[in-house]
Image (cartoon, helix red, strand yellow):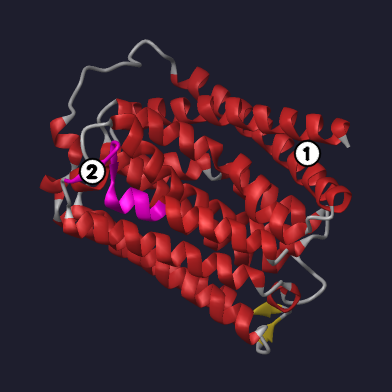
Amino acid sequence: MLKIWIQFLIGAIIIILAAFKLSKYGDIIAEKTGIGRAWVGMIFLAGATALPEFFTTCSSVVIEKAPNLAVGNVFGSIMFNLFIIAILDIIQGHGPILKKVNPGLILLGAISVILSVVAIFGMLLKNAVSVFSIGSASFLIIGIYLVGMRLSFRYQSRNPDESQDREVDEEKKYENVSTSKTVFGYLLCAAAIFGGSIWVAHTAKLIAVGTGLGETFVGSLFLAIVTSLPELMATIGAVRMGLFDMAIGNIFGSNMINIVLIPISDVLYRTGSIYAYLSSTHILTAVVGILLTMIVIIGIIYRSKKSFLKLGWDAIAIIMVYIASTYVIFRLR
């Protein structure tokens, strides 16, 4: 069993290191193409750091034939991504971080909540209505995601003055880095994440069987935390640069992409609609994700300046809900 844990940790380290470099290459590409930092957080940074979840979830379905491991990874990653906000409060240490965030990011949080609600309905109904063994909820999730991205694009274009990029116009950091070298490094890191994610998914299933913890709990805790570590590192880096919008945009953007992984898994899982094979425990993790997102949204709206031990009251609420829900999920495994 110790050997399996060592293999799991090696795969996790590969993902972390590769995703860290991948985020840097994404930043270089953004600078060279003139894309704003707000979009780096929501699209490029989120897309880069969500690669572990993408590859791990897909391999859990296609290779391991473990739908509960895949979906547990999705909702568990959403929970941990939101827990990262509490960690950021401690790191930046100058009052609650959410009071410094652009209110426009509430739109992304609201979209992720809607996507989670649709996923919950899919699991409750077991998707009795399906097309080519693909649940109707999957089509709805994809449609809402595309509409949501369109709305966010239009909001950003209508409110350019709210962007934090206007205040962070530093010198070109990567002027001497060639585009070809950047693209090569980006693809190399993506390949490393691909291999590491498949390995992590394989060893996670062995851990689930060997420890008796079950696929749902392992997917919602161990696998989710490991694949969310790139988000943690990327958001910490953004906060240290004073780019709070980029940090929170990365978290909300990653969560939206995570939910889209459910319909992708539904397409790849050829036994039938994936919703019919999922544990009801995932409904709990999805509800917790919604609750944590609402806490973040309230924090952005209320913009409290008070803190306790460097933690805003919203961050304290996030920590309490995360710990309590993890314990409940463990008990229900």
Q: Residue at x 46, y 26 (%)?
A: 25
The percent position of residue 332, horizontal first and vertical second, equals: 69, 67
What label does residue 199 carry, if any?
Answer: 1
Residue 146 seen in the current view: no
Residue 115 vertical position relative to residue 7 in the rendered view, above or below = below
Instruction: From the viewer's perspective, tell me whether residue 244 is left or right of residue 144.
Output: left
Q: Nearer the viewer, residue 136 or 92?
A: 92
Task: Report the span colored magenta.
Answer: 306-318
- Mark 2 element type: strand
Q: CA distance from mark 1 to mark 2?
A: 41 Å
Residue 226 vertical position relative to residue 62 in the rendered view, above or below = above
Q: Nearer the viewer, residue 89 or 149?
A: 89
Which quadrant would residue 40 be assigned to in this image? top left
Q: Earlier in the sequence, mark 1 or mark 2?
A: 1
Is residue 25 rendered magenta in the image? no
The percent position of residue 140, horizontal first and vertical second, equals: 51, 77
Q: Nearer the viewer, residue 178 or 301?
A: 301
Residue placed under numbered mark 2 in the picture: 307
Residue 331 seen in the current view: yes
The quadrant in which the N terminus is found is top right
Q: Residue at x 36, y 37 (%)?
A: 88
The percent position of residue 238, horizontal first and vertical second, equals: 34, 31
Q: Residue at x 86, y 32 (%)?
A: 2
- For mark 2, does the 10 Å Cα neighbourhood hold few (<14), some (14 to 19), or many (20 or more) residues? some
